[in-house]
């Protein structure tokens, strides 16, 4: 059981580091109040194909790693309670 704890802990550390790196290299996505006032259009070609761009892939991987981070945190909590 100790080996499983260390393997999950190692995965957790790798996911944490990857999540920090991905979160820091992303560009800020929201336009704030100025985007609301000017009425920025979200129905253009770029917005429809955003998942295929570098920013879209970074956002998708950040979400995946965030979910994996939460799952591993719960698993580690359960393993260390035993």
Image (tube, rainbow, N blue to C red):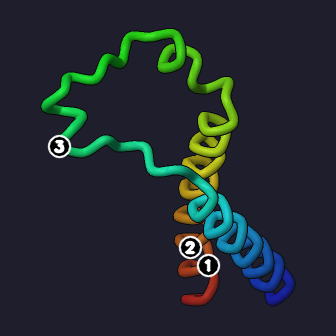
Numbered disc 2: secondary structure: helix
In the image, 39: left or right of 12?
left
Q: Tell me the residue that label 1 is attached to.
A: 76
Q: Tell me the residue that label 3 is attached to.
A: 33
Q: Tell me the residue that label 2 is attached to.
A: 73
Residue 6 position, x and y percent, is 80, 85
Above or below, 56 against 12 in this view is above
Which one is in front, 32 or 10?
32
**Distance of label 1 from label 2 (alpha carbons):** 5 Å
Question: Given contact means CB atoms under 8 Å apart, are the residues at marks 1 and 3 in contact?
Answer: no
Which one is in front, 5 or 41?
41
Mark 1 residue crowding within 10 angstroms, few (<14) / some (14–19) / many (20+) = some
* The residue positioned farthest toward the right in the image shown: 3
Question: Given contact means CB atoms under 8 Å apart, are the residues at marks 1 and 2 in contact?
Answer: yes
Mark 3 residue crowding within 10 angstroms, few (<14) / some (14–19) / many (20+) = few
* The residue positioned farthest toward the left in the image shown: 37
Residue 30 position, x and y percent, is 35, 43
Residue 54, quarter of picture:
top right
Numbered disc 3: secondary structure: helix
Residue 65 position, x and y percent, is 63, 55
Numbered disc 1: secondary structure: helix
At horizontal 72% and vertical 78% (from top left) the residue drawn is 13
Above or below, 33 against 70 in this view is above
Question: Given contact means CB atoms under 8 Å apart, are the residues at marks 3 and 2 in contact?
Answer: no
In the image, 77: left or right of 61?
left
């Amino acid at each position: 059981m100790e080996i499983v704890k260390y393997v999950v802990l190692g995965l957790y550390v790798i996911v944490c580091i990857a999540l920090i790196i991905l979160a820091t290299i992303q560009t800020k996505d929201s336009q704030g109040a100025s985007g609301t006032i000017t009425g920025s259009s979200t129905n253009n070609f770029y917005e429809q194909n955003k998942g295929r761009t570098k920013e879209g892939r970074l956002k998708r991987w950040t979400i995946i790693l965030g979910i994996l981070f939460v799952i591993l945190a719960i698993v580690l909590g359960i393993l260390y309670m035993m």
